[in-house]
Image (cartoon, grey):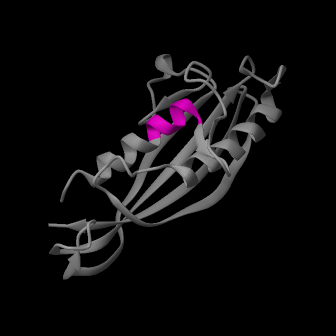
Amino acid sequence: MADHINNIERTLIDNLRTGTYKTATSTATAWSSSDVKVFGQFPETEEAEYPCIIVQQRVNGIEEQFLGMLMSDIDNTTIKRGELYGLGLDIHIAVDKKSVITVDGTGYKQRRLMNYLMLNVANVIMDCDFSGTDTELVSRYHTGFRDMGYDPELELWGATTGMIVVFKNTR
């Protein structure tokens, strides 16, 4: 298998770091890379910084279809063997009591910051552009946010969403 899974994870993490998503006519940035810390796995406790986004691979190999069948490559001129292959990711957001991001001159914190991050994380993951890679996405799904809440002992607000990406794996 080509490096499709790493391409997907790296592109998604890079886009989450800058908060970049598409608008009707161009691109927008929801935050700067210094506002939100993005981790490719759960950080050690002493390394955690807030607000943060954690990308976690949850399932690999879902949505397998046409295993070993003949299919066309990205350029639609080359026939290769391959399949559609699915990857499931969880994206966790955590905000502590001290977290603040300034949006249009207003300091967003706590629950307001969580709402802002949830909306814009959804924008980023659905608009993530993989055209700079050799990975051909067939479909992607945002599974919505769940497990939203506040932990009074840790003084953290948190939410989790999921993303399923189906791509063409040729060999």
Residue 62 falls left or right of residue 76: right
Residue drawn at point x = 42 percent, y = 36 percent? 41
Q: Main secondary structure of the magenta part?
A: helix
Residue 163 falls left or right of residue 160: left
Q: Is residue 18 visible?
A: yes
> x, y (%) of residue 2?
19, 55
Quarter of the view holding residue 170: bottom left
Residue drawn at point x = 50 percent, y = 38 percent? 15
Quarter of the view holding residue 106: top right
- From which residue to which does the magenta span run? 13-19
Q: Is residue 68 visible?
A: no
Relative to 171, residue 81 above or below = below
Residue drawn at point x = 20 percent, y = 73 percent? 77
Relative to 85, residue 52 above or below = above
Which quadrant of the rendered structure holds the C terminus?
Answer: bottom left
Q: Nearer the viewer, residue 51 or 97?
A: 51
> x, y (%) of residue 100?
74, 20
> x, y (%) of residue 118?
69, 44
Which quadrant of the rendered structure holds the N terminus?
Answer: bottom left
> x, y (%) of residue 3?
23, 50
